[in-house]
Amino acid sequence: MPDIPLADLASPAVLARARKIKLFLMDVDGTLTDGGVCLISSTVADGSGAASVSEMKIFNAKDGQGLSLANTMGIQTGFITGRRSPAVAKRAEELKVTFVYLGQAQKTQAFEECVEKAGVTAEEVAYMGDDLPDIPLAQRAGLAISVADGSDELKAGRRKSSLCGSVLHSALRLSRQSAICMAGRAVTLRQVREVPPQ
C-alpha cells in the first residue's frame, strides 16, 4: 500500500493540534488491549485449598513500538485505567511510560495530576480511550482519539478536531502508510480519519 500524504489523514486544524502534543495519555483496557478480561483460575490437584485467580492481558507489540517512538521524540506517555493490574504495571515499566495510574474509578484527578507533573497545558495533551469513563478526559485534552470500536458516546463527545483511529486493537499501531505529526515529528497511526461532530 502506498504512503498516504499527511494532508489526507486529517484536516489542517487537527494536524496543528497534533503538532502541539507533549503528553500522550491513554486508557488501557479496550485501548491497548482488545477489551477482553481473561481470568485464569487454578486449583490444587487434590481439590484441597483455595483456588487462585490470575489475570491475563494481551498487548500488541506494535503498540509498544508506537509508545517507544513517542518517548524517543520527547513526548511523555501515561496510562490511566480503572483496573488495578500487575500486568499493566509491568508493561508500563517495559515501555518506560512516565505516568501510571491504576484503579482510577474517576480518571479526571489522575489526568490533572499528569498535566501538572508534566508541566504542560491541556491543549498539549492527547488522550486516547474507548468508552464512557474516557469522555471527561477526551473533552479536556487538546487532541482526543478514539479507537475504531470505541463507544458512540465517546466519539460524539469529542471536540470537533478529534480523531478516530481505524485499527483492529488500537489507534497506536505503526504503519508506513500514515502519520500524525506531533511536536513537529511523526508518530504513526494507521488509517486515521477526522470524525465530524454530531
Image (cartoon, rainbow, N blue to C red):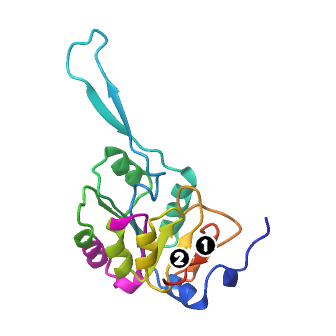
Residue plotted at (58% across, 56% down):
168
**17 displayed left or right of 138:** right
Answer yes or no: do the residues labelled 1 and 2 have beta carbons within 8 Å?
Answer: yes
Residue plotted at (43% across, 64% down):
130
Residue 167: where, in percent of width, then height? 59, 61
Residue 67: where, in percent of width, then height? 49, 62
Q: Is residue 63 above or below residue 183?
A: above
Q: Which mark is residue 163?
A: 2
**187 displayed left or right of 105:** right
Foreground residue among 39 and 122: 39
Residue 113: where, in percent of width, then height? 24, 73
- The local crowd at label 2, few if under 14, some if 14 to 19, many if 20 or more residues have their Cα within 10 Å, is many
Query: Mark 1 or 2 closer to N-term?
Result: 2
Judged from the image, the secondary structure of the residue bearing numbered disc 2 is strand
Residue plotted at (39% across, 64% down):
131
Alpha carbon distance from label 1 to label 2? 7 Å
Q: Is residue 75 visible?
A: no
* Magenta part of the chain: 111-132
**71 displayed left or right of 119:** right
Q: Which residue lies most toward the top here?
A: 46
All told, the count of numbered labels is 2
Residue 128: where, in percent of width, then height? 44, 69
**77 displayed left or right of 111:** right
Residue plotted at (41% across, 71% down):
153
Residue type at mark 2?
Leu
**Magenta stretch encompasses residue 126:** yes
Judged from the image, the secondary structure of the residue bearing numbered disc 1 is strand
Residue type at mark 1?
Val
Q: Which residue lies most toward the right here?
A: 2
Q: Quadrant of residue 148?
A: bottom right
Q: Circle 1 is placed at which residue position? A: 192
Foreground residue among 114 and 164: 164
